Amino acid sequence: MANYRQRGKNSWELTVSLGRGADGKYIRRTKTIVVEDERILRAPKRLETYLDHEWLKFKEEIEAGSYIAPAKLTFSQFVEIWKEKYAIKQLERKTIYNYQVNLNLRILPAFGHLQLDQIKPLHIVDFLESLGKDGSRKDKKSGALSSGTVQMNHRILKNIFSRAVEWKVIKENPVAEVKKPKVVHKEIIPYDEDEVRAMLQALQKEPYHWRMMITLALTTGMRRGELLGLEWKHIDWESGVIDVQQSVPISLKGEVIVKEPKTRNSKRKVALSPSVLAELRDYYIYRIKERNVIGDAWQGGDHFFVFSHADGRAFHHERPYLWFRQFIKKNGFRYIRFHDLRHTSATLLINQGVHAKLISERLGHGSITTTMNIYGHALRSADQAAAEKFENLFNMDGKKTEKKTRGS
């Protein structure tokens, strides 16, 4: 059989034979190419050389296992190819995890069965619109998904279809012309001092490790991944300082990713109050005894995380969030996210009159501008409270002056 044959005015079908299969039938792979260069089409010898070259390239792709056959390829099938040839090699492990969660929960049920080239922009628009409606959540909560989650689904789809265009599986990306959904940032309302006191009281009845994790989250402003990545070797007992050196952005069964924190500024030193340091020391003694009892059953490897399972295994990266959600529900506290403990920490410092520059360094922000943007409202409120103190001072002076005048 010829390696290629003409199918249209300027299109040819390339064929590569892979021999006989187990059933005795020949296995062939085909690919249609279009020649648009008129100079090649007008010169038979040049056209033959070009087609031979394209056929050899096609044959090499098949033999290397890199050829993607577009015929009747479903979205679900292409996602597997995308993961193998792009996601695993180019994306961070945590990003892959988050993408996979959204693919399994939302995207694949909607598009998995459709052929890749049949998905049009209107399908994408309808899908994103459905995510913003009540009942779109998969966690049994009422209401719609957050605008951030809707935008993430748009980003995932755009990434997948961009690779399909790049690899010439389809001609156009149906997501390219679909406007990116806007993210509506909800106002952060962290706990006030009374709520923090109530929560600390309720924590006394909780397991030791959770009590200490929430205490550190409140008093240091450390991120969840930074708390999960914290090891005992990062604590200077003499100076009472935590050296934030690493983070655990993702931890699954049998796989723990330990890496440097979010940004260059995230590597920082955070001072502890004497009482928190003393409590942390007691917890350290508790963990050492716990490890000694476990003995050879210890599974922490080279890491001795401050917060982990009793046998040293790292917590799943979502476990603090899930535990905290149940804790506040059980105790009837106002709902905030685990990450909002970080915001609570910053706001408490602002209310105590701590300078924004020091707060910025403590939180590991890239610049004080980031701190000002996030906590601008709290800083303005603190500034107003400071102004009112002057008002009270001058009012008192005014009253004293008035009394003096009357008595003279």
Image (spheres, rainbow, N blue to C red):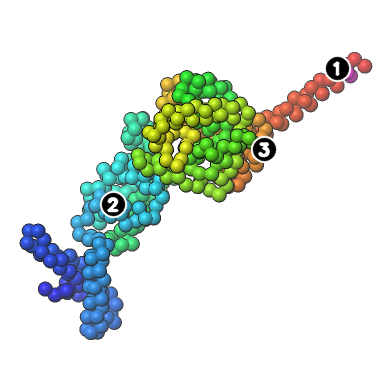
On residue 63, the disc is: none
Tell me if mark 2 has few (under 14), some (14-19) or many (20+) residues whose alpha carbon lies within 10 angstroms of its own.
Answer: many
Q: Main secondary structure of the magenta part?
A: helix
Cα distance in 3D space between marks 3 and 1: 38 Å
Which amino acid type is shown beneath numbered disc 3? His
Classify 65 as above or below 269.
Answer: below
Classify 328 as above or below 271.
Answer: above
Q: Looking at the rendering, in which quadrant would you find the C terminus?
A: top right
Q: Which residue is mark 2?
A: 79
Q: Residue at x 26, y 78 (%)?
A: 50
The picture places residue 175, in percent across and down from the top left corner, at 34, 53
Q: Which residue is mark 1?
A: 403
Span shown in magenta: 402-406
Of callouts 1 and 2, which one flags the residue occurring earlier in the amino acid sequence?
A: 2
**Nearest the camera: 189 or 316?**
316
**Nearest the camera: 180 or 254?**
254
Which amino acid type is shown beneath numbered disc 1? Lys
Secondary structure at badge 3 equals loop
Is label 1 or label 2 in front? 2
Q: Which residue is mark 3?
A: 355
For residue 245, say whether it is visible: yes
Of callouts 3 and 1, which one flags the residue occurring earlier in the amino acid sequence?
A: 3
Which amino acid type is shown beneath numbered disc 2? Val
The quarter holding residue 378 reads top right
The reply, left or right, for residue 393 in relation to residue 244 is right
The picture places residue 61, in percent across and down from the top left corner, at 26, 66
Of callouts 3 and 2, which one flags the residue occurring earlier in the amino acid sequence?
A: 2
